[in-house]
Image (cartoon, rainbow, N blue to C red):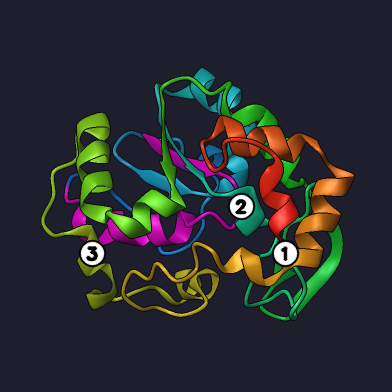
Amino acid sequence: MIVQCGFPRAGSTLLYLMMRSSVSNYHFFDKEQRALTVISKGVITKRPMDIFDYKEILQKIDAKFIINIRDPRSVVTSVHAHSEGQYKVSWDHSLLTGPTGIRPGKTKGLLDYIKIVRKVPRAIFVSYEDLVQDPDVQQKRLGDFCGFIYKDSFSNFYKHSVPSKLQTPLNGVRPVDVSNIDKWKEHPERIKQQFKECPELFDVLIYFGYEKDKTWINRL
């Protein structure tokens, strides 16, 4: 079993569709599926919050984990199709959304994910930035790690049929697009506010290689 999880708004749906359209030796689902409800060999699930269930999953099955990460500045400035124009994820919480828009309540924030991703064993990290800039390289990495047998290229995912419940998180099905990598720069006030409230995010950027120091914020 392979469990895809990790940061929210980090390209998990994009990667899942890439694998779904190209991997021939695993079963995929037509919607986001909690791993604990389908514990089984030969399946791949996708749900960012499954990162918090990794210990329980490993108690039930010898799973591998694909962990999606993304520049935290992009995560906290991302808008989901159902978030009614509001930012989906903040450092301390995430909005609950659905087909009818925002639902009452909140769930875990980005910092909760950051604190746990490095604890998961049998895992491979895939960054959104690497995925959109060179999907072929990530396809090779994942193939080696997971033992995938391929029938097509990751880059061709959009040419295949996409289940309706996996279309919405993408904000539209289209070829791989690198234009969103630095889109966070269009939200300077949001960035300043999030990093002021959670200075730990500065160190996270450095840890994952997105910045070398903290001076970048002075250029916003």
* Residue 4 is one of the magenta-drawn residues: yes
Q: Is residue 9 left or right of residue 152?
A: right
- Asked which secondary structure carries label 2, the reply is loop
The disc, 3 or 1, on the residue closer to the chain's N-terminal end is 1
Instruction: Give the residues drawn in magenta, as a range.
Output: 1-24
Q: Which residue is mark 1?
A: 88
Which residue sits at x=79%, y=73%? Answer: 102
- In this orientation, does residue 92 appear? no
Q: Is residue 84 left or right of residue 69?
A: right
Query: Do the CB atoms of the residues marked 1 and 2 lie less than 8 Å apart?
Result: yes
Q: Which residue is mark 2?
A: 8
* Amino acid at dot 2: Pro
* Residue 109 is one of the magenta-drawn residues: no
Query: Do the CB atoms of the residues marked 3 and 1 lie less than 8 Å apart?
Result: no
Depth check, front residue: 93 or 176? 176
Q: Which residue is mark 3?
A: 155
Which residue sits at x=29%, y=50%? Answer: 27
Residue 192's spot in the image, x, y percent?
A: 81, 56
Crowd band around label 2 with a 10 angstrom C-alpha radius: few (<14), some (14–19), many (20+): many
